[in-house]
Image (cartoon, grey):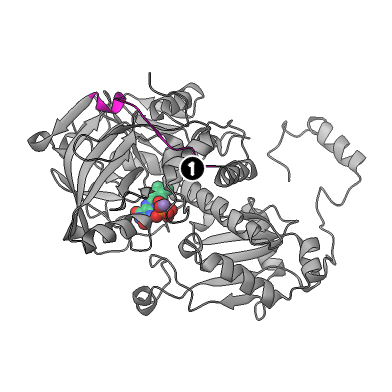
Protein backbone atom coordinates (compact mmCIF):
# COMPACT_ATOMS: atom_id res chain seq x y z
CA UNK A 1 0.00 0.00 0.00
CA UNK A 2 1.42 3.36 -0.94
CA UNK A 3 0.95 6.32 1.35
CA UNK A 4 -2.11 8.44 0.69
CA UNK A 5 -3.41 11.96 1.10
CA UNK A 6 -2.93 15.19 -0.83
CA UNK A 7 0.36 16.13 0.92
CA UNK A 8 2.15 12.82 0.33
CA UNK A 9 0.57 11.51 -2.86
CA UNK A 10 0.36 13.59 -6.04
CA UNK A 11 -2.41 11.41 -7.52
CA UNK A 12 -4.52 11.97 -4.39
CA UNK A 13 -3.77 15.71 -4.60
CA UNK A 14 -5.13 15.81 -8.17
CA UNK A 15 -8.17 13.75 -7.14
CA UNK A 16 -8.87 16.15 -4.28
CA UNK A 17 -8.68 19.17 -6.58
CA UNK A 18 -11.10 17.50 -9.00
CA UNK A 19 -13.50 16.65 -6.15
CA UNK A 20 -13.49 20.16 -4.71
CA UNK A 21 -13.91 21.74 -8.15
CA UNK A 22 -10.42 23.25 -8.09
CA UNK A 23 -9.29 21.26 -11.14
CA UNK A 24 -11.00 20.56 -14.46
CA UNK A 25 -10.46 17.31 -16.36
CA UNK A 26 -10.08 18.46 -19.97
CA UNK A 27 -11.08 15.68 -22.38
CA UNK A 28 -10.86 17.93 -25.44
CA UNK A 29 -7.65 17.31 -27.43
CA UNK A 30 -5.00 19.86 -26.48
CA UNK A 31 -1.54 20.31 -27.94
CA UNK A 32 1.47 20.41 -25.59
CA UNK A 33 2.98 22.77 -28.15
CA UNK A 34 1.95 26.18 -26.77
CA UNK A 35 -1.76 25.38 -26.30
CA UNK A 36 -1.42 23.77 -22.83
CA UNK A 37 0.84 26.70 -21.86
CA UNK A 38 -1.65 29.29 -23.12
CA UNK A 39 -4.55 27.68 -21.25
CA UNK A 40 -2.48 27.45 -18.06
CA UNK A 41 -1.36 31.09 -18.30
CA UNK A 42 -5.00 32.18 -18.63
CA UNK A 43 -5.89 29.97 -15.67
CA UNK A 44 -3.39 31.89 -13.48
CA UNK A 45 -4.74 35.22 -14.70
CA UNK A 46 -8.39 34.32 -14.17
CA UNK A 47 -7.82 32.28 -10.99
CA UNK A 48 -9.61 29.36 -12.60
CA UNK A 49 -9.37 25.70 -11.52
CA UNK A 50 -6.19 23.82 -12.46
CA UNK A 51 -6.35 22.28 -15.96
CA UNK A 52 -5.78 18.50 -16.17
CA UNK A 53 -5.04 17.88 -19.85
CA UNK A 54 -6.17 14.28 -20.38
CA UNK A 55 -6.15 14.11 -24.18
CA UNK A 56 -2.85 15.48 -25.40
CA UNK A 57 -2.20 15.46 -29.13
CA UNK A 58 1.53 14.66 -28.82
CA UNK A 59 3.44 12.07 -26.81
CA UNK A 60 2.39 8.47 -26.19
CA UNK A 61 -1.34 8.07 -25.44
CA UNK A 62 -2.26 8.04 -21.76
CA UNK A 63 0.14 10.68 -20.50
CA UNK A 64 -1.43 13.73 -18.92
CA UNK A 65 -0.38 17.24 -17.82
CA UNK A 66 -1.57 19.21 -14.80
CA UNK A 67 -1.12 22.97 -15.27
CA UNK A 68 -1.09 25.57 -12.50
CA UNK A 69 -0.62 23.06 -9.66
CA UNK A 70 -0.41 25.89 -7.12
CA UNK A 71 -2.32 28.65 -8.88
CA UNK A 72 -4.60 30.85 -6.81
CA UNK A 73 -8.32 30.22 -6.59
CA UNK A 74 -10.96 32.81 -7.43
CA UNK A 75 -13.43 31.36 -4.94
CA UNK A 76 -14.07 33.71 -2.01
CA UNK A 77 -12.26 32.50 1.10
CA UNK A 78 -10.29 29.87 -0.84
CA UNK A 79 -7.57 31.98 -2.46
CA UNK A 80 -4.77 29.74 -1.11
CA UNK A 81 -6.71 26.45 -1.30
CA UNK A 82 -4.56 24.73 -3.94
CA UNK A 83 -1.41 25.77 -2.12
CA UNK A 84 -2.81 24.53 1.21
CA UNK A 85 -3.67 21.16 -0.36
CA UNK A 86 0.09 20.66 -0.88
CA UNK A 87 0.32 20.38 2.91
CA UNK A 88 -2.94 18.59 3.57
CA UNK A 89 -4.45 21.79 4.98
CA UNK A 90 -7.99 23.09 4.46
CA UNK A 91 -9.04 25.25 1.54
CA UNK A 92 -9.65 28.25 3.81
CA UNK A 93 -6.06 28.30 5.15
CA UNK A 94 -4.63 31.82 5.51
CA UNK A 95 -1.06 32.88 4.67
CA UNK A 96 -0.26 33.25 8.36
CA UNK A 97 -1.49 29.68 9.09
CA UNK A 98 0.64 28.40 6.19
CA UNK A 99 3.76 30.10 7.54
CA UNK A 100 3.25 29.02 11.15
CA UNK A 101 2.76 25.44 9.97
CA UNK A 102 5.98 25.57 7.91
CA UNK A 103 7.90 27.19 10.76
CA UNK A 104 6.87 24.68 13.41
CA UNK A 105 8.23 21.92 11.17
CA UNK A 106 11.53 23.86 10.89
CA UNK A 107 11.75 23.74 14.66
CA UNK A 108 10.75 20.07 14.96
CA UNK A 109 13.10 17.10 14.76
CA UNK A 110 13.51 15.79 11.21
CA UNK A 111 11.62 12.60 10.34
CA UNK A 112 13.81 10.65 7.88
CA UNK A 113 12.24 8.86 4.91
CA UNK A 114 11.31 5.17 5.05
CA UNK A 115 12.69 2.81 2.42
CA UNK A 116 10.03 0.57 0.90
CA UNK A 117 10.70 -2.27 -1.60
CA UNK A 118 8.63 -0.89 -4.47
CA UNK A 119 5.89 1.58 -5.32
CA UNK A 120 3.64 2.95 -8.07
CA UNK A 121 6.53 4.83 -9.73
CA UNK A 122 7.86 1.41 -10.81
CA UNK A 123 4.71 0.47 -12.77
CA UNK A 124 6.66 1.16 -15.97
CA UNK A 125 10.44 0.91 -16.23
CA UNK A 126 12.49 1.93 -19.27
CA UNK A 127 16.25 1.55 -19.27
CA UNK A 128 19.14 1.95 -21.71
CA UNK A 129 18.03 2.25 -25.33
CA UNK A 130 14.36 2.23 -24.32
CA UNK A 131 14.78 5.70 -22.82
CA UNK A 132 13.15 8.24 -25.10
CA UNK A 133 11.97 11.40 -23.39
CA UNK A 134 10.08 12.51 -26.51
CA UNK A 135 7.49 9.78 -25.76
CA UNK A 136 6.27 12.12 -23.03
CA UNK A 137 4.18 15.20 -23.84
CA UNK A 138 7.04 17.60 -23.10
CA UNK A 139 5.45 21.03 -23.49
CA UNK A 140 6.61 24.12 -25.33
CA UNK A 141 5.40 26.69 -22.79
CA UNK A 142 5.96 30.11 -24.37
CA UNK A 143 6.74 30.99 -27.99
CA UNK A 144 9.91 32.78 -26.82
CA UNK A 145 11.31 29.62 -25.17
CA UNK A 146 14.47 28.03 -26.54
CA UNK A 147 13.09 24.52 -26.09
CA UNK A 148 10.56 22.22 -24.49
CA UNK A 149 10.63 22.03 -20.68
CA UNK A 150 10.28 18.65 -18.97
CA UNK A 151 11.06 19.79 -15.44
CA UNK A 152 9.24 22.94 -14.38
CA UNK A 153 7.58 21.44 -11.28
CA UNK A 154 9.82 18.62 -10.24
CA UNK A 155 12.87 18.25 -8.06
CA UNK A 156 16.43 17.04 -8.43
CA UNK A 157 17.84 14.42 -6.07
CA UNK A 158 21.61 14.54 -5.48
CA UNK A 159 23.83 13.39 -2.63
CA UNK A 160 27.29 14.49 -1.50
CA UNK A 161 30.18 12.12 -2.33
CA UNK A 162 30.56 11.32 1.41
CA UNK A 163 26.79 10.48 1.53
CA UNK A 164 26.30 12.88 4.44
CA UNK A 165 23.68 15.08 2.81
CA UNK A 166 20.94 14.40 0.26
CA UNK A 167 19.38 17.44 -1.39
CA UNK A 168 15.95 17.70 -2.99
CA UNK A 169 15.66 20.95 -4.96
CA UNK A 170 13.49 22.48 -7.66
CA UNK A 171 15.31 23.78 -10.74
CA UNK A 172 14.11 23.78 -14.32
CA UNK A 173 15.24 21.32 -17.00
CA UNK A 174 14.88 21.67 -20.77
CA UNK A 175 14.74 18.78 -23.22
CA UNK A 176 18.10 18.52 -25.00
CA UNK A 177 18.03 15.14 -26.75
CA UNK A 178 16.06 11.86 -26.54
CA UNK A 179 17.88 10.99 -23.31
CA UNK A 180 19.38 14.29 -22.18
CA UNK A 181 18.19 17.42 -20.41
CA UNK A 182 19.92 20.73 -19.77
CA UNK A 183 19.32 23.22 -16.98
CA UNK A 184 20.84 25.58 -14.46
CA UNK A 185 22.66 24.41 -11.33
CA UNK A 186 23.72 27.72 -9.77
CA UNK A 187 26.75 27.37 -7.46
CA UNK A 188 24.89 29.09 -4.58
CA UNK A 189 22.01 26.59 -4.81
CA UNK A 190 22.43 23.15 -3.24
CA UNK A 191 22.18 21.36 -6.59
CA UNK A 192 25.13 23.38 -7.89
CA UNK A 193 27.08 22.98 -4.63
CA UNK A 194 26.81 19.19 -4.66
CA UNK A 195 27.39 18.95 -8.43
CA UNK A 196 30.61 20.89 -7.93
CA UNK A 197 31.79 18.46 -5.20
CA UNK A 198 31.56 15.57 -7.69
CA UNK A 199 32.93 17.56 -10.63
CA UNK A 200 36.00 18.57 -8.62
CA UNK A 201 36.76 14.86 -8.24
CA UNK A 202 36.32 14.50 -12.00
CA UNK A 203 33.29 12.27 -11.42
CA UNK A 204 29.73 12.23 -12.71
CA UNK A 205 27.10 13.38 -10.21
CA UNK A 206 24.61 10.56 -9.60
CA UNK A 207 21.25 12.20 -10.14
CA UNK A 208 17.50 11.68 -10.28
CA UNK A 209 14.62 14.02 -11.07
CA UNK A 210 11.15 13.47 -9.66
CA UNK A 211 8.01 14.79 -11.38
CA UNK A 212 4.58 14.50 -9.84
CA UNK A 213 6.24 14.16 -6.45
CA UNK A 214 4.34 14.24 -3.16
CA UNK A 215 3.21 17.92 -3.12
CA UNK A 216 4.69 18.62 0.34
CA UNK A 217 8.04 17.29 -0.91
CA UNK A 218 7.93 19.50 -3.99
CA UNK A 219 7.24 22.54 -1.82
CA UNK A 220 10.11 21.66 0.56
CA UNK A 221 12.40 21.23 -2.46
CA UNK A 222 11.52 24.82 -3.37
CA UNK A 223 12.39 26.08 0.12
CA UNK A 224 15.74 27.64 1.06
CA UNK A 225 16.46 25.41 4.05
CA UNK A 226 20.12 25.69 5.13
CA UNK A 227 22.91 23.65 3.53
CA UNK A 228 23.42 20.14 4.97
CA UNK A 229 19.72 19.86 5.80
CA UNK A 230 17.92 16.99 4.04
CA UNK A 231 14.62 18.27 2.67
CA UNK A 232 13.24 14.71 3.05
CA UNK A 233 13.50 14.91 6.86
CA UNK A 234 11.79 18.28 6.83
CA UNK A 235 8.88 16.85 4.81
CA UNK A 236 8.55 14.05 7.38
CA UNK A 237 8.35 16.62 10.17
CA UNK A 238 5.94 18.78 8.20
CA UNK A 239 3.49 16.00 7.32
CA UNK A 240 3.96 13.96 10.49
CA UNK A 241 5.00 10.81 8.66
CA UNK A 242 8.16 9.61 6.92
CA UNK A 243 8.14 9.85 3.11
CA UNK A 244 8.11 6.39 1.52
CA UNK A 245 11.06 6.15 -0.87
CA UNK A 246 12.30 3.48 -3.26
CA UNK A 247 15.78 2.92 -4.67
CA UNK A 248 16.41 4.10 -8.20
CA UNK A 249 17.00 1.42 -10.85
CA UNK A 250 20.43 2.53 -11.99
CA UNK A 251 22.04 4.33 -9.05
CA UNK A 252 21.91 4.38 -5.29
CA UNK A 253 19.59 7.37 -4.86
CA UNK A 254 16.11 7.13 -3.33
CA UNK A 255 12.94 8.74 -4.70
CA UNK A 256 9.38 9.04 -3.38
CA UNK A 257 7.70 5.72 -4.16
CA UNK A 258 4.43 7.10 -5.53
CA UNK A 259 5.94 9.77 -7.81
CA UNK A 260 4.39 10.07 -11.26
CA UNK A 261 7.64 10.11 -13.28
CA UNK A 262 11.25 9.52 -12.20
CA UNK A 263 14.25 10.25 -14.41
CA UNK A 264 17.56 8.80 -13.26
CA UNK A 265 21.12 9.05 -14.44
CA UNK A 266 23.94 11.49 -13.90
CA UNK A 267 25.09 15.05 -14.41
CA UNK A 268 28.18 15.30 -16.57
CA UNK A 269 31.18 16.82 -14.72
CA UNK A 270 32.07 19.17 -17.58
CA UNK A 271 29.66 18.89 -20.51
CA UNK A 272 27.39 21.89 -21.12
CA UNK A 273 24.81 22.81 -23.75
CA UNK A 274 22.79 25.95 -24.50
CA UNK A 275 19.69 26.30 -22.31
CA UNK A 276 16.85 28.78 -22.53
CA UNK A 277 15.62 31.32 -22.94
CA UNK A 278 12.49 30.63 -20.90
CA UNK A 279 9.73 32.90 -19.61
CA UNK A 280 10.86 33.42 -16.03
CA UNK A 281 9.61 34.03 -12.50
CA UNK A 282 10.22 37.79 -12.60
CA UNK A 283 7.71 37.99 -15.44
CA UNK A 284 10.08 38.55 -18.37
CA UNK A 285 11.62 36.50 -21.13
CA UNK A 286 15.10 37.64 -22.11
CA UNK A 287 16.58 36.56 -25.41
CA UNK A 288 19.56 34.25 -25.68
CA UNK A 289 20.59 30.95 -24.19
CA UNK A 290 23.31 30.18 -21.65
CA UNK A 291 25.59 27.14 -21.36
CA UNK A 292 24.34 24.87 -18.57
CA UNK A 293 25.15 21.35 -17.33
CA UNK A 294 23.81 18.34 -19.24
CA UNK A 295 21.77 15.69 -17.39
CA UNK A 296 21.99 12.16 -18.84
CA UNK A 297 18.93 9.96 -18.37
CA UNK A 298 19.75 6.24 -18.06
CA UNK A 299 16.35 5.07 -16.87
CA UNK A 300 12.79 6.38 -16.67
CA UNK A 301 10.14 4.93 -14.41
CA UNK A 302 6.53 6.10 -14.27
CA UNK A 303 3.03 5.41 -13.07
CA UNK A 304 0.33 4.25 -15.46
CA UNK A 305 -1.48 7.26 -16.97
CA UNK A 306 1.32 9.45 -15.60
CA UNK A 307 0.60 13.12 -14.93
CA UNK A 308 3.36 15.67 -15.59
CA UNK A 309 2.85 18.80 -13.46
CA UNK A 310 3.75 22.03 -15.23
CA UNK A 311 4.47 25.56 -14.06
CA UNK A 312 4.22 28.11 -16.85
CA UNK A 313 6.51 30.74 -15.39
CA UNK A 314 5.89 34.43 -15.99
CA UNK A 315 3.86 37.27 -14.54
CA UNK A 316 2.31 36.53 -11.12
CA UNK A 317 0.69 34.56 -9.70
CA UNK A 318 2.34 31.27 -10.69
CA UNK A 319 4.22 28.68 -8.60
CA UNK A 320 7.45 30.70 -8.41
CA UNK A 321 5.40 33.19 -6.42
CA UNK A 322 2.86 31.01 -4.63
CA UNK A 323 5.20 28.13 -3.70
CA UNK A 324 8.71 29.60 -3.86
CA UNK A 325 7.58 32.95 -2.43
CA UNK A 326 5.68 31.32 0.41
CA UNK A 327 8.54 28.99 1.31
CA UNK A 328 10.98 31.95 1.27
CA UNK A 329 8.55 33.89 3.50
CA UNK A 330 8.53 31.09 6.07
CA UNK A 331 12.30 30.64 6.05
CA UNK A 332 12.84 34.42 6.22
CA UNK A 333 10.35 34.92 9.04
CA UNK A 334 11.97 32.15 11.08
CA UNK A 335 15.43 33.70 10.56
CA UNK A 336 14.30 37.19 11.55
CA UNK A 337 12.31 36.07 14.57
CA UNK A 338 15.00 33.80 15.92
CA UNK A 339 17.54 36.62 15.59
CA UNK A 340 15.55 38.46 18.26
CA UNK A 341 14.46 41.37 16.03
CA UNK A 342 10.97 42.79 16.74
CA UNK A 343 9.47 41.16 13.65
CA UNK A 344 5.94 39.77 13.58
CA UNK A 345 5.45 38.62 9.98
CA UNK A 346 7.22 38.32 6.63
CA UNK A 347 5.61 37.90 3.23
CA UNK A 348 6.85 37.84 -0.36
CA UNK A 349 3.90 39.61 -2.01
CA UNK A 350 3.00 37.38 -4.94
CA UNK A 351 2.40 40.52 -7.03
CA UNK A 352 6.08 41.49 -6.63
CA UNK A 353 7.22 38.28 -8.40
CA UNK A 354 9.50 37.11 -5.54
CA UNK A 355 11.57 40.31 -5.94
CA UNK A 356 10.60 41.75 -2.55
CA UNK A 357 9.79 40.53 0.91
CA UNK A 358 7.67 42.68 3.23
CA UNK A 359 8.57 42.48 6.90
CA UNK A 360 6.20 43.76 9.57
CA UNK A 361 7.60 45.22 12.76
CA UNK A 362 5.99 45.22 16.20
CA UNK A 363 6.47 48.91 17.04
CA UNK A 364 5.99 48.42 20.81
CA UNK A 365 8.84 45.93 20.88
CA UNK A 366 10.82 48.14 18.50
CA UNK A 367 10.51 51.08 20.89
CA UNK A 368 11.82 48.94 23.74
CA UNK A 369 14.98 48.10 21.75
CA UNK A 370 15.78 51.83 21.42
CA UNK A 371 17.07 51.21 17.88
CA UNK A 372 17.35 53.95 15.28
CA UNK A 373 16.07 53.33 11.76
CA UNK A 374 19.62 52.86 10.49
CA UNK A 375 20.34 50.28 13.20
CA UNK A 376 17.14 48.35 12.53
CA UNK A 377 17.69 48.36 8.77
CA UNK A 378 21.33 47.25 9.11
CA UNK A 379 20.31 44.48 11.52
CA UNK A 380 17.66 43.19 9.10
CA UNK A 381 20.20 43.36 6.24
CA UNK A 382 22.73 41.39 8.24
CA UNK A 383 20.27 38.63 9.09
CA UNK A 384 18.63 38.36 5.67
CA UNK A 385 21.22 39.35 3.08
CA UNK A 386 23.87 37.06 4.60
CA UNK A 387 21.60 34.01 4.40
CA UNK A 388 20.80 31.35 1.76
CA UNK A 389 17.21 32.66 1.94
CA UNK A 390 18.04 36.36 1.62
CA UNK A 391 20.29 35.73 -1.39
CA UNK A 392 17.12 35.02 -3.36
CA UNK A 393 15.22 38.26 -2.69
CA UNK A 394 16.71 41.65 -3.61
CA UNK A 395 14.34 44.05 -1.79
CA UNK A 396 12.99 44.26 1.73
CA UNK A 397 10.14 46.54 2.82
CA UNK A 398 9.74 47.32 6.50
CA UNK A 399 6.26 48.30 7.74
CA UNK A 400 4.54 48.59 11.12
CA UNK A 401 2.33 45.67 12.01
CA UNK A 402 -0.93 47.61 11.82
CA UNK A 403 -0.55 46.68 8.13
CA UNK A 404 -1.71 43.25 6.97
CA UNK A 405 1.27 42.58 4.74
CA UNK A 406 -0.50 39.75 2.89
CA UNK A 407 -2.91 42.41 1.52
CA UNK A 408 -1.12 44.18 -1.35
CA UNK A 409 -3.50 47.17 -1.16
CA UNK A 410 -2.34 47.87 2.39
CA UNK A 411 1.33 47.46 1.43
CA UNK A 412 0.99 49.95 -1.41
CA UNK A 413 -0.78 52.40 0.91
CA UNK A 414 1.98 52.11 3.50
CA UNK A 415 4.72 52.56 0.91
CA UNK A 416 3.10 55.62 -0.59
CA UNK A 417 2.24 57.34 2.68
CA UNK A 418 5.03 56.29 5.06
CA UNK A 419 8.27 55.87 3.15
CA UNK A 420 10.46 58.99 3.03
CA UNK A 421 12.17 59.38 -0.34
CA UNK A 422 15.44 60.78 1.03
CA UNK A 423 15.82 59.01 4.36
CA UNK A 424 13.81 55.82 3.92
CA UNK A 425 15.83 53.97 1.29
CA UNK A 426 18.97 52.02 2.11
CA UNK A 427 21.07 50.42 -0.65
CA UNK A 428 23.40 47.45 -0.06
CA UNK A 429 25.60 47.40 -3.17
CA UNK A 430 27.99 44.85 -1.65
CA UNK A 431 25.35 42.30 -0.67
CA UNK A 432 25.45 39.10 -2.76
CA UNK A 433 22.29 38.19 -4.63
CA UNK A 434 20.65 36.09 -7.30
CA UNK A 435 21.88 37.31 -10.70
CA UNK A 436 18.47 36.87 -12.39
CA UNK A 437 16.97 40.14 -11.10
CA UNK A 438 15.98 42.10 -14.25
CA UNK A 439 17.27 45.58 -13.26
CA UNK A 440 20.84 44.50 -12.44
CA UNK A 441 23.64 45.96 -14.56
CA UNK A 442 25.94 43.55 -16.48
CA UNK A 443 28.70 44.37 -13.96
CA UNK A 444 26.43 43.48 -11.02
CA UNK A 445 25.43 40.21 -12.70
CA UNK A 446 29.12 39.34 -13.21
CA UNK A 447 30.04 40.27 -9.63
CA UNK A 448 26.98 38.53 -8.15
CA UNK A 449 26.50 41.59 -5.93
CA UNK A 450 24.39 44.73 -5.89
CA UNK A 451 20.85 45.87 -6.49
CA UNK A 452 19.77 45.03 -2.95
CA UNK A 453 17.86 47.52 -0.83
CA UNK A 454 15.74 47.98 2.25
CA UNK A 455 12.86 50.43 2.09
CA UNK A 456 11.64 51.68 5.43
CA UNK A 457 7.93 52.45 5.56
CA UNK A 458 8.18 53.09 9.31
CA UNK A 459 7.20 56.58 10.47
CA UNK A 460 9.67 58.40 12.75
CA UNK A 461 7.39 58.26 15.81
CA UNK A 462 6.93 54.51 15.37
CA UNK A 463 10.47 54.08 16.73
CA UNK A 464 8.98 55.43 19.98
CA UNK A 465 6.09 52.96 19.77
CA UNK A 466 3.63 55.71 18.83
CA UNK A 467 1.46 56.23 15.76
CA UNK A 468 0.47 59.90 15.39
CA UNK A 469 -2.59 59.38 13.24
CA UNK A 470 -5.39 56.88 13.47
CA UNK A 471 -6.57 55.13 10.34
CA UNK A 472 -9.64 56.67 8.70
CA UNK A 473 -11.41 53.49 7.69
CA UNK A 474 -14.56 51.44 8.17
CA UNK A 475 -12.94 49.46 10.96
CA UNK A 476 -11.48 52.42 12.78
CA UNK A 477 -13.83 55.36 12.29
CA UNK A 478 -17.21 54.06 13.53
CA UNK A 479 -18.50 52.63 16.80
CA UNK A 480 -18.61 48.84 16.82
CA UNK A 481 -22.36 48.79 17.30
CA UNK A 482 -22.89 50.88 14.14
CA UNK A 483 -20.48 48.77 12.10
CA UNK A 484 -22.28 45.62 13.12
CA UNK A 485 -25.65 47.15 12.18
CA UNK A 486 -24.39 48.33 8.78
CA UNK A 487 -22.92 44.92 7.94
CA UNK A 488 -25.97 43.09 9.26
CA UNK A 489 -28.43 45.18 7.27
CA UNK A 490 -26.34 45.40 4.09
CA UNK A 491 -29.02 43.89 1.88
CA UNK A 492 -31.57 46.12 3.57
CA UNK A 493 -29.79 49.19 2.16
CA UNK A 494 -30.38 47.64 -1.26
CA UNK A 495 -26.87 46.27 -1.90
CA UNK A 496 -26.28 42.78 -3.27
CA UNK A 497 -25.47 40.37 -0.41
CA UNK A 498 -21.85 40.34 0.85
CA UNK A 499 -20.71 42.96 -1.68
CA UNK A 500 -17.11 41.81 -1.85
CA UNK A 501 -14.79 41.33 1.07
CA UNK A 502 -14.67 44.36 3.38
CA UNK A 503 -11.40 45.18 5.07
C1 LIG B 1 8.27 26.33 -9.61
C2 LIG B 1 9.67 26.64 -9.14
C3 LIG B 1 10.68 26.78 -10.07
C4 LIG B 1 11.99 27.05 -9.68
N1 LIG B 1 12.99 27.12 -10.62
C5 LIG B 1 14.27 27.29 -10.22
C6 LIG B 1 15.33 27.24 -11.17
O1 LIG B 1 15.14 27.01 -12.36
N2 LIG B 1 16.61 27.45 -10.72
C7 LIG B 1 16.87 27.67 -9.38
O2 LIG B 1 18.04 27.82 -9.00
N3 LIG B 1 15.87 27.72 -8.46
C8 LIG B 1 14.59 27.52 -8.87
N4 LIG B 1 13.59 27.55 -7.92
C9 LIG B 1 13.90 27.93 -6.54
C10 LIG B 1 14.59 26.84 -5.77
O3 LIG B 1 13.87 25.65 -5.84
C11 LIG B 1 14.74 27.27 -4.30
O4 LIG B 1 15.54 28.42 -4.21
C12 LIG B 1 15.27 26.17 -3.40
O5 LIG B 1 15.58 26.74 -2.15
C13 LIG B 1 16.52 25.53 -3.96
O6 LIG B 1 16.87 24.43 -3.15
P1 LIG B 1 18.14 24.49 -2.20
O7 LIG B 1 17.84 25.53 -1.17
O8 LIG B 1 18.19 23.11 -1.64
O9 LIG B 1 19.31 24.85 -3.06
C14 LIG B 1 12.27 27.25 -8.30
C15 LIG B 1 11.25 27.10 -7.36
C16 LIG B 1 9.97 26.78 -7.76
C17 LIG B 1 8.91 26.57 -6.72
MN1 LIG C 1 18.64 22.35 0.24
Q: Is residue 137 visible?
A: yes
Label 1: state its secondary structure: helix
Position in image of residue 168 (x %, y %)? 37, 46
Q: Is residue 149 visible?
A: no
Is 197 or 184 nearer to us in this picture? Answer: 197
Label 1, ligand 2: CB separation under 8 Å? no
**Magenta span:** 109-123
Q: How many marks?
A: 1
Structural crowding at the residue carrying mark 1, measured as other residues with C-alpha within 10 Å and reported as few (<14), some (14–19) or many (≥20): many
Outermost top residue? 1
Q: For residue 118: magenta? A: yes
Left or right placement of residue 365 versus residue 79 in this view: right
Rendered image quadrant of residue 502: top right
Q: Which residue is identified by label 1?
A: 234
Residue 314 or 156: which is nearer the viewer? 156
Residue 32 percent across, percent down from the top left: 25, 38
- Identify whether 177 is placed above or below 12: below
Amino acid sequence: MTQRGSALNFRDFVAELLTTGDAVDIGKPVSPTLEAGAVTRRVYDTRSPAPLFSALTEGDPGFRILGAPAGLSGRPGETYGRLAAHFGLGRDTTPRDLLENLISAMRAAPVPPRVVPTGPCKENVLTGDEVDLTRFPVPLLHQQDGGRYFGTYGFHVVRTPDERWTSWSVSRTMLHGPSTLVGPAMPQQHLGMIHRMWAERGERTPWAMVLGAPPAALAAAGMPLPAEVDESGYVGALTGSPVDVVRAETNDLYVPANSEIVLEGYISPDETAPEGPMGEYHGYSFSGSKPQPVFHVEAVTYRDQAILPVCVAGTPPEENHTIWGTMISAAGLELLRSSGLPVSMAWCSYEAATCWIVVSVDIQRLARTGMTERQLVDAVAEVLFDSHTGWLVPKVLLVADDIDITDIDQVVWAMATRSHPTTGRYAYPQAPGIPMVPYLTPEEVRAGRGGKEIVSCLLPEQFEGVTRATTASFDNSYPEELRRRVVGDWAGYGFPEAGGSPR
